[in-house]
Image (spheres, rainbow, N blue to C red):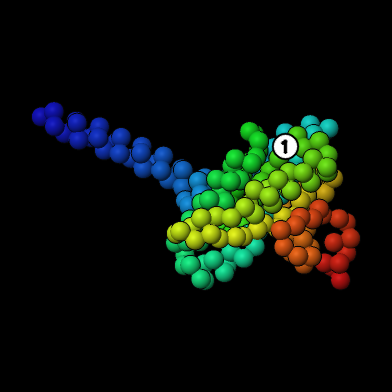
Amino acid sequence: GSGGLIAMLEDVTGSHVAQARIAHMATYDGLTGLLNRAAFEEKVAQRLASRREQDSLALFFLDLDYFKQVNDTLGHAAGDTLLFEVASRLRSTVRDGDLLARFGGDEFVLMQAGCSSPNEAASTAMRLIQALGEPYLIDGQHVMVGATIGVTIAPRDGQDIATLFKRADMALYRAKSEGRSTFHFYHQEMDRVAKE
């Protein structure tokens, strides 16, 4: 009968939906809907490869300040709500064409193409810190966290993704050591200090 054919069609549609869902899971962070690390790295690598000589590109590594305390005192559900809120603030702060990702935990990363100068990158970092530093309302409680940011600029700080990521991480580490809710650019002497 024709019943078998209909069942087969439904089955095919079902597997298409499943494939689309798997593809989505492979690309996006389940909690925030931002790109995940693998997808972000792939896209940044593409941008770096197709970058024209005069184009620069800024990478921002963000860590939330005091996120662990929120998790510890209000619980993981509150922590998840906070991460979701952070993601939506980031989305509304960045420009079209910027790439946003969550690298896991409370680490977020932004890539801004066509970043014309360190000054422009600095003002982006300050905007992000300001946006994330406003109080959050979670389960009827006002929660304050901040963001600390490390910044690298390509091609100045590196041409390939591994170098840029490593140096953004160094800059983030330096920013954290100088206090919270602040940002730091990568500088050459960080490599030397790291080696020592």
Q: Residue at x 82, y 67 (%)?
A: 194
Q: Residue at x 76, y 40 (%)?
A: 57
Q: Quadrant of the N terminus?
A: top left
- For mark 1, does the 10 Å Cα neighbourhood hold few (<14), some (14 to 19), or many (20 or more) residues? many
Q: Quadrant of the C terminus?
A: bottom right
Which quarter of the picture shows residue 177? bottom right
Q: Residue at x 26, y 38 (%)?
A: 11
In this view, the residue in front, 152 or 142, is 142
Which quarter of the picture shows residue 188? bottom right
In this view, the residue in front, 116 or 103, is 116
Return the x and y of residue 25 as percentages of the image width and height.
46, 47
Side of 153 relative to 139 (left or right):
right
In this view, the residue in front, 142 or 176, is 142
Return the x and y of residue 76 as percentages of the image width and height.
47, 65
Furthest-top residue in view?
2
Number of disc labels? 1
Which quarter of the picture shows residue 97? top right
Return the x and y of residue 115 as percentages of the image width and height.
77, 37
Return the x and y of residue 81 as percentages of the image width and height.
48, 56
Q: Which residue is mark 1?
A: 113
